[in-house]
Amino acid sequence: MFALPGGPIYLARAPVDLRKSIDGLSVLVSQVLQQDPFSRQLFIFINRRRDKLKALSWDQNGFVLYYKRLERGRFPWPAIDAGQSALVIEARQLQWLLSGLSIEQRQALPVVSAQVVA
């Protein structure tokens, strides 16, 4: 897997024609998601059948485009309110999604901020 950028991760609500590449997806980021495609954020798009996805991000000197196609099954894409253009998720939720798990895991362990006690 590639290194995730430090910013938020956006899941686009509406399915996208994944014949679009970097230029087409960056236009969707700016016009539909109303975000800056050159920011340190990750934008995830899915096709209508939910068996393919593309992730787009800017990496200091160029765009990075990640593509995943499932041979069997579908990604468990979450329901996103019609008033929203995207859903912001955490990095671990993206890992769940790429593994075929729902991002709304009810049994996930909470993130703990550990401190050293002297």
Image (tube, helix red, strand yellow):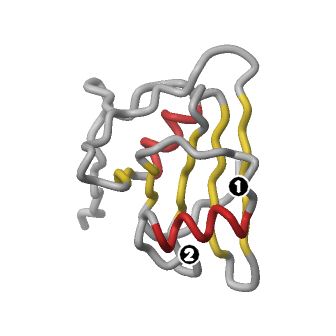
Q: Position of residue 53 (x, y in %)?
A: 64, 41
Residue at 59%, 70% in the rendered image: 27
Mark 1 is surrounded, within 10 Å at the Cα level, by few (under 14), some (14 to 19) or many (20 or more) other residues, namely few
For the C terminus, the image quarter is bottom left
Mark 2 is surrounded, within 10 Å at the Cα level, by few (under 14), some (14 to 19) or many (20 or more) other residues, namely many
Q: Is residue 117 above or below residue 95?
A: below
What is the CA distance from the residue labelled 2 to the residue labelled 1?
A: 18 Å
Q: Which mark is residue 37?
A: 2
Compared across the picture, whether 39 is left or right of 108 comes to right
Compared across the picture, whether 27 is left or right of 72 comes to left
Q: Position of residue 55 (x, y in %)?
A: 63, 54
The single residue placed furthest to the top in the displayed view is 72
Amino acid type at circle 2 is Pro
Residue at 32%, 28% in the rendered image: 105
Q: Is residue 118 above or below residue 59?
A: above
Residue at 28%, 57% in the rendered image: 113
Image quadrant in which you'd find residue 59: bottom right
Image quadrant in which you'd find residue 50: top right
Q: Secondary structure at mark 2?
A: loop
Identify which residue, 116 or 36, lies in the foreground: 36
Q: Position of residue 18 (x, y in %)?
A: 69, 45
Residue at 57%, 41% in the rendered image: 46
Amino acid type at circle 1 is Phe
Q: Is residue 65 above or below residue 82?
A: below
Q: Position of residue 5 (x, y in %)?
A: 56, 67
- The residue identified by callout 1 is 2
Identify which residue, 68 or 92, lies in the foreground: 68
Tell me which label, 2 or 1, sits earlier in the chain.
1
Image quadrant in which you'd find residue 99: top right
